Every structure is written in structure tokens, then in C-alpha cells.
Image: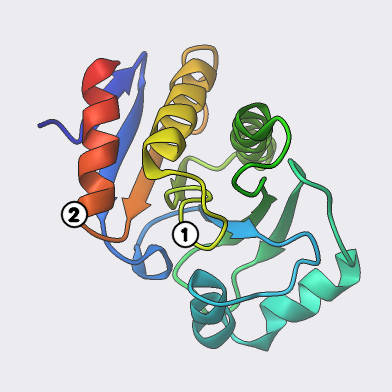
Amino acid sequence: MSNELRVNDNIIRLMVGFITDIPDMDGIVYYARPDLALGSGFGTAISIQGGPKVQEELRKYGSASVTDVVVTGAGNLKTKHILHAVGPRFQEEDEDTKLKATILNTLKKAQELKLQKIAFPAMGSGFYGIPLDASARLTLGAARDFLDKVTEPKEVVFCLRDNRELKAFQEQLQKM
């Protein structure tokens, strides 16, 4: 199965790894809580690897609503920016619409910042309970639709935790 999709001059790429360890990204996306506190999983990794500066920047914002995107520096991480995207929880009202809006708002913010390469996790599929197939369908579809109309970002990477996540995203990518 393919791990890449060309959309005009842009690329959607799938990979397995830990999002905080990817080199050469201009920004990484974190599926944030509305209170913008760095929680467990990737939040802990961002807090530890990025250092206290990231959480300090987040405190200035206070909180955010679902579909909002807050941008901070990345502290000691290998990227320039962290895009903290507040997405819906599983079975929240209008969950699909909100998740797609969260992805689109994140990509718009990346475009505003002139980011060329941005990495997303499997949005909402962990702690927030969004089914993996729904995450793959909605996030890949939103990324493809966005990249079909713009020139930046040049590369959108979906950094997936394991082969189970990769397979779900590969299956959806094949349908495109």
C-alpha cells in the first residue's frame, strides 16, 4: 500500500513514529484539551522534551474552544512551532463536522505562518475516543481538500504511533 498522495504540487505522507521526534518539520500538531494543559501521551512528551517554555506560553492563552488552534514555540523540540488544535471528543454533538473544522483551521494556521512541512497525529483517536477509521477518513479528506486549493503547506505528514494506525490511514489513502 502507498504511503503518499500527491495533491497538485503538495504531498500527504504517512509514517510511523513519535511526532515529537520527527526532524525537519516546521510545525507539529497536538490534539489539545480546551484548558490547554499538556496532558498525558504526546502532551507529556511535549512537556518533557520541549521544556517548560511551551506550557508557559499556553498559560497566556488560558483556554480555547473546540475547533480553535493556538500556536506556541516548540521549546527544545526539533520543530519551530506546535499547533495546539482543540478537537471534539467521541460522541460529541456534530463530532465529524467539528473534527473536520479543527483540521482545516490547523491547516489555515499553518498557511498563515508559511509552514512548509507540518505533522499531525491520528487526530482524536487516542484519549478522546474518535474511532480510528473516522479519524483517518476525516483528517485525510480535509487535508486533501485543503491542499487541492493552496500551495502551502507543501507537505502534510500523518505521524502514526503504530502499524494499526498506519493500516487504517493507508486504507483511507487508497480510497482517495
Q: Looking at the picture, how far across and down is residue 95, in whole percent?
A: 65, 35
Q: Is residue 176 above or below residue 173?
A: above
- Marks 2 and 1: in contact by CB < 8 Å? no
Q: Is residue 130 left or right of residue 25?
A: right
Q: Is residue 139 left or right of residue 96?
A: left
Give the SS element for disc 1: loop
Q: Residues within 10 Å of mark 2 (few under 14, many from 20)?
A: few
Whichever of labels 1 and 2 marks the residue nearer the N terminus, that label is: 1
Residue shown at the point (78%, 73%) measured from the top left: 57
Between the residue at mark 1 and the residue at mark 2, the CA separation in whole angstroms equals 15 Å
Left/right placement of residue 64 relative to residue 41 reads right
Q: Position of residue 124 (x, y in %)?
A: 53, 50
Given residues 72 and 2, the one toward you in this image is 2
**Looking at the image, which residue is at 73% across and 35% down?**
93
Which residue is nearer to you in this view: 157 or 125? Answer: 125
Q: Position of residue 69 (x, y in %)?
A: 73, 48
Q: Given the image, on which type of amino acid does mark 2 rest?
A: Asn
Q: Which residue is mark 2?
A: 163
